[in-house]
Amino acid sequence: MCPARRTLSARRTLRARRALRASRARRTRDDHRTRSWPRPDQRALVLPPLLFVLVLLVLPVVFIALYSVGLRTNIPGTPTAFSLSGWQDFLFGGGSAFRGRFVYSIEIALIVSVATTLAAYPLAYFLAFVARRRRYALLLVLLAPFFTSYLLRVIAWQIILNNNGVVNSLLWALHLRPHGSAVSWLIYSNFSVALVLFYTWIPFVALPIFVVLENMDHRLPEAAADLGASRAATFWRVTLPLSLPGVIAGFVFVLIPTTGEFITPLLVGGPNNQLFGNSIQAFFGDTPDWNYGSVLAITLIVVVVVLTLAFGRFLQTDLRADARPQS
């Protein structure tokens, strides 16, 4: 490397280090301001949304908790008393079908979350670094189908994957399968549930990753390249570590709602591929046993809270464009 290029590389590296230190210092100051106790006038502004959360979110959970321990019942004339029989049956009952369905639902949620995150990262990378001026137009195209009803999109997939649907009809027309012999695992299977959930969530996983990549200080990859790092080394050692907050956010965006999903398995999963959310919906809709349904609902709420607390500490990042260091 010639002396002039070595000097230029050293200057860029020094600027990148200064920018990184300035960004960390700014983030520390912002965190300190955020953690400070609000002033009296600010508390008045916080009170209405706090009451909204308490009345519409916390209070229903309290009622569900009371149902789960037998202190309330939806059957008129039934005496109420504190009882943990529902919890004992769900947690320790021999061969509990609902405990098995809970484990199955978590497995499906993990598989869908990992697959969606792996597929969304290249898409977000393309939008942030390759699409350039067309990135927002392509992002709008990506999100356009989601302006329609979620239920209609699931029904459309049901038509596509059905035994007499689009896929099987195309296979018959191309003589790839005997006419009338449908691919049975396309519908009412683990595959159909995972595929529709994958399609549903991939734009919402790509979005936080795209935001992190878009707001990342692009001088850091340039400095790595000036120091002789290859594109692969720059990605693995610079780009990917800096984009991990977006990756984890996208992963959580899929994992948490998928654990309670019930529309998709109801329409494309069939009776043998129902998830935990379907069991909860059945107890509150098809049967009068709200007490046992509340046990399942509280279990799911606890899992969601634990997942949020577990992954929340990895999401401490400032995604605002004005937080990027200025050159």
Image: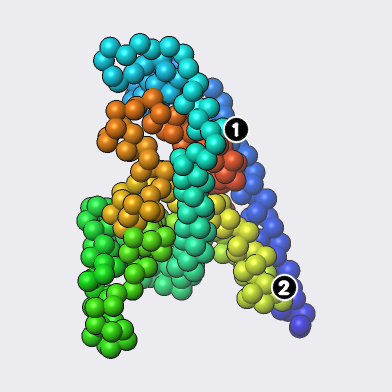
**Rendered image: mark on residue 241:** none
* Residue named by callout 1: 32
- Where residue 322 appears, as percent x and y from the top left, is 48, 49
> Nearest the camera: 124 or 172?
172
| Quadrant where the C terminus is found in the figure | bottom right
Could you tell me which residue is drawn at 61 percent across and 49 percent down? Answer: 23
Going by the image, does 3 lie left or right of 91? right
At which x and y percent is residue 211? 46, 56
The vertical placement of 69 against 210, above or below, is above
SS label for mark 2: loop
Question: Residue, x 43% and y 11% (percent of image)?
Answer: 81
Locate the N terminus and report the quarter of the image it occupies: bottom right
Q: Does residue 58 show up?
A: no
Disc on res. 227: 2
Amino acid type, callout 2? Leu
Crowd class of label 1 (few under 14; some 14 to 19; many from 20; radius 10 Å): few
Name the residue located 57 percent from the left edge and 44 percent from the top edge: 311
**Where on the picture, by quarter, is residue 157?**
bottom left
Amino acid type assigned to the residue bearing label 1 in the image: His
Residue 205 in the image: x percent, y percent? 44, 56
Determine the image quadrant of residue 92. top right
Q: Say which residue appears at 76% left-offset and 83% top-offset.
A: 2
Which element is circle 1 on? helix
